[in-house]
Image (tube, coloured by chain):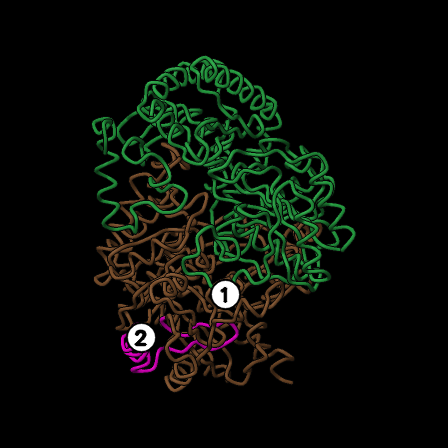
Chain colours: A green, B brown
Amino acid sequence: MGAEAGRYRETAALFARAERVIPGGIYGHQSPRLLVPGAYPYFFARGAGARVWDVDGNEYLDLVCGYGPIVLGHNHPAVDAAAAREAANGRCYNGPARPFVELAERLVALTPWAAWAVFAKNGSDVCTWAVQVARAATGRTKILAAKGAYHGTHAWCAPLPGGTTPEDRAHVATYRYNDLASVDRALALHDGDVAGIIVSPFRHDAFHDQEMPAPGFLAGLRERCDARGAVLVLDDVRAGFRLSLAGSGDAMGVEPDVTCYCKALGNGYPISAALGRERLREAAMQVFFTGSYWTGPVEMAAALACLAELEASDAIAHMRRIGTRLRDGMVGQGETHGLPVHWSGPPALPFMTFRDDEGSFVRSRVFAAACAARGVYLHPHHNWFVSAALTDADVDRILDVTDAAFADVARSPEHRA
Amino acid sequence: MGAEAGRYRETAALFARAERVIPGGIYGHQSPRLLVPGAYPYFFARGAGARVWDVDGNEYLDLVCGYGPIVLGHNHPAVDAAAAREAANGRCYNGPARPFVELAERLVALTPWAAWAVFAKNGSDVCTWAVQVARAATGRTKILAAKGAYHGTHAWCAPLPGGTTPEDRAHVATYRYNDLASVDRALALHDGDVAGIIVSPFRHDAFHDQEMPAPGFLAGLRERCDARGAVLVLDDVRAGFRLSLAGSGDAMGVEPDVTCYCKALGNGYPISAALGRERLREAAMQVFFTGSYWTGPVEMAAALACLAELEASDAIAHMRRIGTRLRDGMVGQGETHGLPVHWSGPPALPFMTFRDDEGSFVRSRVFAAACAARGVYLHPHHNWFVSAALTDADVDRILDVTDAAFADVARSPEHRA
């Protein structure tokens, strides 16, 4: 721990215990190595609405939202009440319960092109299954995925090579996001054997500025899949239900063949889903897909309540407005402090980098640590998530903090160097 | 629906809705195609202790227990109270919470050979990760797995080929459970490239009688791994915490290098875990492993409470005694009715087949349907699960039902044919 050791004393103590009994202390996307080691809280004790509290009792306005799941705010009363009603009956049976059918009906009704839904627990579960369904439907093997895109932890797409073999990626070909010529090269290389293309609704790779889909890019993928009888899979795990209740394909003007959801679907309750077209129903039945808790009714009741609340409160419009205020405020602050920034992505899932900081993220880390020290939790390397719980007063408070954080960056040795 | 249509009217109605919006209506291990179509409840509405109620309001004594997770009984008050206390704080943060560390500490303390733990949501997550850790630790590729054993849905071990490619299994070699000579053949075939062996503590393949490990079999795997520097992975997803709090390796007298848990760990709350040896810590850090909800504190608080209750109530001894009573009763009933049975597996995870019914399961289905019609839920093709909530009075009731069910089988056209 560094200068902020006092502030993060309990985080440090708990992390020392964690390091003894957990490899790396904290693994995966929450690893402190991916944040600002020593100048960040690693462990949390409480969340409510737009706020979280770390184990030291420090309070934060939350712009990471559990890396996406928290879309209505932490511990949303309507979601928790619906889940609790279902949990009072039970949570793990020998078969599904009513919410299994009701949630599938609800998602299909929200999504004009979709005929069916399935449920699992992780984004990885559904993204991997979707590309397998593409293989089963076409009798072909190759999947095209954007270079650097994250579609889950499974070996065919894991961002680190440890424990994987070359065969795990034998049938994965890559293209560059927003580059149809690179898609065409991959299609030509595997002519006749392309089962499907997987794509996110916009480019949101960690450690990169985000990129919205270029005009014609997603439509170009759609046309190319149609021309070849290949399956277009939209990985909407990260963005789903922050841009449209019909999925981010709706927001971006493309109708995929399968959409994968997770994150915001359950407002923090563990659930993921895939929706698909009628013509893939038989293929969907051929790919083995099951898990101990995948028909659990509590998470499905939570998802039903989350969707109802998103709709009733017009949360998507609210998040767009809040995200736009954050953008306008922070972009202006950057200019004022002589620190021009890149602001990227849709308002509800924004990301900010410093213009003269490309690839190093040195200023991003100083900025993020300065925000954390003042009670705003955002991420130096990963896109942020707006929740519907953020009020205009919260935005005012966030912008006060970011203004001071920009000043810190301007004064920092990293900047002056 | 068949003769019992009235009894399962709501199941039938809900399944008709499900078939429209979910491929196959219900997928995976809960598919009605794996039960007795038309003569079984498919959808559940409530659980309490040793009992579940289907959507028609029919009550069952539960011998499937959600296919394992329910070890203390449905909606166990101490587990639910611990989870609710944690949930009042929050359920999905930007990092873990205290229960993440506390549960790792608890599991490591329970398990003499283990130095660390990690958590996920599914048995598949941890079994696949464990074999990847074996690869990362050894720099080798081949994994030996028992033919027909289920280690999850992932493509390297999925029981159905749909959507998989030959490359998915390129590095998986098979042996026969309880056959060290077959293990030696696989080892010889891949001499110098065996990363690890994965094995369940006893053979519990669906559609088969169970087999306890033959004397020396698990020790033989241990010796062979030690001699080659390979990793022994115990898939304790199904049996864990029903035979020993230190894992089924403890019950069977073998100390693996990694143990995979799921099912009973959280008494129905979605959580899985892997425990490993100190010498695998670095390898564990090299294999990417993460999921949106994998550090969720609610499920970990449930697991801590579940372990505490299992220990305090001596639940494992109770389940052994209950399972033994079921065995003695049902084996005797089979003899009385002229229907000798195979009873297999440990008392807490028993399975029963009819001796002259091998491979067809015709009598098993008649028996299971007859039990369901009388209020006992058991499975014709998959091992059963005893819960600690079963009382001696429940066993008496179950045995009344099974006696009548045996009589039904004896009278059935399938038997007389």
Q: Position of residue B262 (x, y in %)?
A: 40, 57
Q: Residues within 10 Å of mark 1 (few under 14, many from 20)?
A: many
Q: Position of residue B129 (x, y in %)?
A: 41, 59
Say which element carries label 1: loop
**Lateral position of residue B234 relative to residue A395, left or right:** left
| Residue with the mark numbered 2 | B225
Q: Is residue A410 above or below residue B321?
A: above
* Nearer to the camera, B230 or A406: A406
Say which element carries label 2: helix
Is the C terminus of chain B in the top left, top right, bottom left or bottom right quadrant? bottom right
| Residue with the mark numbered 1 | B378
Q: CA distance from mark 1 to mark 2?
A: 37 Å
Q: Position of residue B156 (x, y in %)?
A: 51, 66
Q: Residues within 10 Å of mark 2 (few under 14, many from 20)?
A: many
Taking the view exactly as shown, the residue that stands out farthest to the front is: A417
Is the N terminus of chain B in the top left, top right, bottom left or bottom right quadrant? bottom right
Q: Which residues are magenta?
A: B201-229
Subunit ID for the residue under disc 1? B
